Image: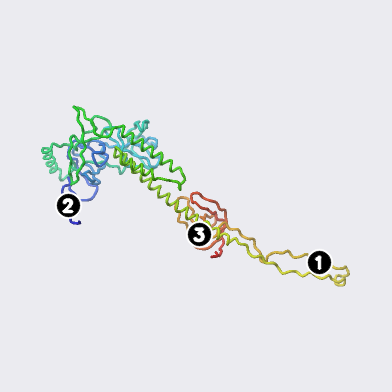
Amino acid sequence: MRPLLVAITVLLLATSPVRAQSTTFPYEAIVDADDVYARSGPGKRYYPTMKVRSGLRVSVYRHDPGGWYMIAPPPGSFSWIRVEHVRRTSRNAGELIADNVVARVGSAFSDVRDVEQRRLSTGDRVEILDEKTLDVDGRDVPMYKIKPPRNEYRWISGQYLARPDKIAARRRSLSERSLSDGSGDDGGSPFDRKPNAYVVDDKPRASTRNGIRERPLVRTLHGDAVRRSLPSQAQIEADRRQLRKLDDRFRSELRQKTGEWNFVTLDTDYKQLRKDAALPALASQVDMRLAAVERYSAIKQEYVAFVKLTRETDLREAQLTAMVRRPRPRIEPPSVRPSRPRAPEETGGVGPLPPKPPIPSQPINAQPRRKYAGAGIVQRSATTFTGAPRYVLLAPNGRILAYLQGVEGVDLSRAIGKAMGITGSRAYRSDLQTDLIRVRSYTPIRLRP
């Protein structure tokens, strides 16, 4: 198996239009053909963003299957972003004021913008080129035309790129191929005179560049008119409506309590939509939703496990608290013998004195009984979210009894690893799913087994 893999690798490198003398990316290449289109993704199913001229120097960042090379956006490339998420700082500059904002790849041939590669965050800066109102799901939405953000790319068929030192030989090879099969550009023309149309092949054929067979895309000709054999606008809108319905179900599910989340049917419906999607760009948006479903499913599992553990500790916590609060045995003082009446001569002739009042009954060495809010072993908390308590009170078997947060002046670090009786206010915290004790003081105790 290993010799076969080596042979295939050598064959791919030998047949690549731009020979990989160096595998270091990025490297510089030259567009060595006319009417070549930069596209929004690695394949002819992705819409073209612009036409690049012969002789243009581009930076190649990656080689993708099918002979498509990922390049930096050529001069003139642009993207779209909603105006409402940008605070304009100057005539040609703006700053994001929201997180998770989608930047959509624009096209010079129409207002199509189905592909998203980047999501921007608060504080990110953008270069504003123009402003335009576009139709978004039947609504007019103001959008900024911006310079492509960092780490956004375009794709060109690798057969039309050459390294500077190989340009002459590359042109001779393309000329011979053009004479033999009549092929010219990348097999398409821009949008066939109709907005939002994708570029497809003029005639059905299959390519086997780099040993990878591509599925041909077909165009149907009717006289001088060209009709695209792609999904209709009605199909695309139907898929978008279905995606919005599933998103509404997703948001509705997240409004429920964490333990009641159920994403089984939602996950199935998202996968079915991805399978039936008319556009690859919409399928990629569904993939983002499926990743979110997976994350929230993991959150639910962790939550259920935590609640189960918390419930199991309730009984043990009550037992420990009862043992600490058990009253000490009352020790009665020695009984006082009644005094005998004194004779008059003993009292100066004034008769017998009244008896002394009895000594009040009280425990020997009695102290006020301390009431603890909790008792157990103090340890550092493993909870890491923002604002989480730094300490936790554990039972001897390691179960969580309560979280601890010292008031000003109380240092709980000195109590780590020790059995302590905790004094303070105790209340339930929903985000912790258990109690939180605000510690005013703590006292060493001995826990009974």
Q: Where is residue 354 in the image (x, y as percent from the top left)?
A: 83, 66
In the picture, the disc for residue 355 is 1
Q: Nearer the viewer, residue 62 or 265?
A: 265
Q: In the picture, which quadrant includes the N terminus?
A: bottom left
Q: Which of marks 3 and 1 is in front?
A: 3
Q: Which residue lies furthest to the right in this view?
A: 349
Mark 3 or mark 1, earlier in chain: 1
The residue at the point 88 percent across, 69 percent down is 349
**Residue matched to label 3:** 394
Q: Where is residue 16 in the image (x, y as percent from the top left)?
A: 17, 46
Residue 99, image quadrant = top left
Mark 1 neighbour class, 10 Å CA radius: few under 14, some 14 to 19, many 20 or more:
few
Mark 1 or mark 2, earlier in chain: 2
Mark 2 vs mark 3, CA separation in Å? 62 Å
**Residue matched to label 2:** 10
Disc 3 secondary structure class: strand
Mark 1 vs mark 2, CA separation in Å? 118 Å
Mark 1 touches mark 2? (CB < 8 Å) = no
Q: Position of residue 409 (x, y in %)?
A: 55, 56
Task: State whether residue 407 appears in this view.
Answer: no
Task: State whether residue 26 appears in this view.
Answer: yes
Q: Position of residue 197 (x, y in %)?
A: 26, 33
The residue at the point 17 percent across, 53 percent down is 7
Disc 1 secondary structure class: loop
